[in-house]
Image (cartoon, rainbow, N blue to C red):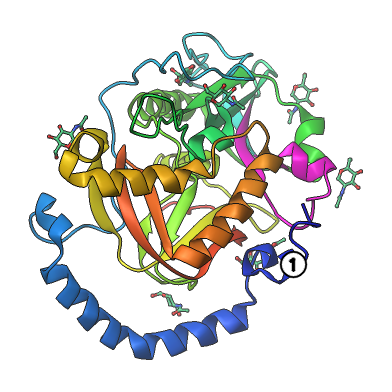
Amino acid sequence: MSSNHPDLLSYPLVGNVIAKTNDTKQCRRKKNRMFTLSVTVLITAWSCVYCKRTSGRQEWPVPYRRFDHRPAADPYCQALYPFCPSGESDGRVPRMALSDRIDIFRLQTPVWEFKYGDLLGKFHIMHDAIGFRSRDTGKNYTMEWYELFQLGNCTFPHIREGKSAPFWCNQGAACFFEGIDDLHWTQNGTLEKVGQMSGTQFNDMTQWVQDDNRTGIFYETWTVQAEPCPNSTIWFESYDCSQFVHRTYRKLADFGVKLSSAIQTNYTKIYLFSGEPSFLGNDSSIFEDAAKKALAEDIRNFYYAFRPHQSVKDFIISFIKLFDKVVLEKSFYLFYNFEYWYLPMKPPYVKITYEEVPLPSVV
Ligand SMILES: *[C@@H]1O[C@H](CO)[C@@H](O)[C@H](O)[C@H]1NC(C)=O
Ligand SMILES: *[C@@H]1O[C@H](CO)[C@@H](O)[C@H](O)[C@H]1NC(C)=O
Ligand SMILES: *[C@@H]1O[C@H](CO)[C@@H](O)[C@H](O)[C@H]1NC(C)=O
Ligand SMILES: *[C@@H]1O[C@H](CO)[C@@H](O)[C@H](O)[C@H]1NC(C)=O
Ligand SMILES: *[C@@H]1O[C@H](CO)[C@@H](O)[C@H](O)[C@H]1NC(C)=O
Ligand SMILES: *[C@@H]1O[C@H](CO)[C@@H](O)[C@H](O)[C@H]1NC(C)=O
Ligand SMILES: *[C@@H]1O[C@H](CO)[C@@H](O)[C@H](O)[C@H]1NC(C)=O
């Protein structure tokens, strides 16, 4: 990989996190240009042909769509590794005695390619989960949320013969199983007790998880933001393993559970940077409308270069190809809520960060 990309290390995305001082300076400079920019955006918005879908202003970030149930995955999508092999097949989670005390663990580990491969240290691509341990029974459990058909399939669609629309195998779901594999989480990762709750709180959490799992069905790799600055507008939020962990922690905090960590709680985020996105449509409104033939062709061509691969390492290679393409063409077709959006890309285009998200506090 590095022989194809000798200047890889000079790419901003490999820096993982741009130095804070640069960030702030860059943000201040950007602010002065913000007014001019917002006037331009306003004028463009008036003439925006795609805005007719939403009456009034588009809400940012675009709310992640909830479904009333999870559809079965299309048989075309075949998992190389079975999803949640040690979980109960119906997603059942054991009930805890109401008076039980349950320890809560923050779990994080590098995706294995990054632990054992030459990519370690260049990218912090982490997987996150939560662990529980019942004081009554001594049994412990792991809860995580991940892709049914792996990261590549959630990030890049399949371009299939005879189908004009790109085909996505992008479901993600929660997996709950008995046991915590201490070694897995402690090698280059984290296994830390961050709190304790009652059996009642655990059972309430379970109810919420099942609901969340039924209604939130697709994985989203990208966070799309206007600038690489902390307070900049977020156009789209990712929906991945770490977001699930954050949602769960927030839920626990809502229940009154106190969480704290002795170490900095950082998470992987994969960013795209763009100007204000415009809505394009869904499969039927784009790919079955003769008038949108050129757009349909563009979207297919865009994704043709990044067909999903088997490993995270291949994903990173696609990711670097994508970076080149996006820099040249300054555009990206984002698939979110099963609809396409056009992103007018701008520097630094794409970036992988490993940044702090503090544990929520009880209000
Ligand atoms: C991605 O999806 C394709 C199509 O179903 C499948 O053949 C492949 O095994 C999937 N990849 C992984 C890693 O599951
Ligand atoms: C979440 O949904 C998936 C897919 O239907 C299922 O396999 C899994 O058991 C569910 N997990 C929980 C915790 O309900
Ligand atoms: C979870 O249980 C297993 C099996 O008893 C044990 O080896 C492991 O140390 C436990 N981990 C935690 C964090 O409690
Ligand atoms: C990561 O873990 C592996 C296996 O335990 C070890 O060989 C390697 O030195 C560790 N790397 C770092 C940076 O801690
Ligand atoms: C972001 O917003 C917070 C709260 O409004 C503020 O304290 C902080 O200084 C802002 N950071 C930047 C870089 O503008
Ligand atoms: C696709 O968009 C069209 C036009 O907005 C809408 O009528 C249709 O219900 C949408 N299809 C799906 C599957 O959401
Ligand atoms: C964790 O995040 C903070 C702030 O987001 C950052 O300053 C720090 O370098 C990160 N730690 C690592 C190990 O990357």
Mark 1 surroundings within 10 Å by alpha-carbon count, few (fewer than 14), some (14 through 19), many (20 or more): few
Residue, x 44% and y 27% (percent of image)?
160
Q: How many labels sit on residues?
A: 1
Residue, x 38% and y 51% (percent of image)?
333
Ligand 1, seen in the image, is in the quarter at: top right
Determine if residue 89 is in view. yes
Q: Which residues are magenta?
A: 107-132
Which of the 4 image quadrants contains residue 69? top left
Q: Where in the figure is residue 281, as x and y percent of width and height?
A: 22, 44
Q: Is residue 119 left or right of residue 277?
A: right
The answer to whether residue 356 is magenta is no
Q: Where in the figure is residue 354, as x and y percent of width and height?
A: 63, 58
Q: Is residue 3 left or right of residue 318?
A: right
Residue, x 7% and y 55% (percent of image)?
55
Mark 1, ligand 7, within 8 Å: the answer is: no
Q: Where in the figure is residue 135, as x and y percent of width and height?
A: 66, 23
Residue, x 61% and y 18% (percent of image)?
177
Looking at the rendered structure, the kind of residue marked 1 is: Leu
Q: Nearer the viewer, residue 253 or 40?
A: 40
Q: Is residue 341 above or below residue 21?
A: above
Q: Which residue is mark 1?
A: 9
Q: Nearer the viewer, residue 178 or 198?
A: 178
Q: Is residue 45 left or right of residue 218?
A: left
Q: Where in the figure is residue 334, as x and y percent of width and height?
A: 38, 49
Pick out the residue farthest to the top. Answer: 89
Q: Is residue 115 above or below residue 216?
A: below
Which of the 4 image quadrants contains residue 101? top right
Determine if residue 257 is in view. no
The answer to whether residue 130 is magenta is yes
Q: Is residue 268 above or below residue 45?
A: above
Label 1: state its secondary structure: helix
The quarter of the picture where the C terminus appears is bottom left
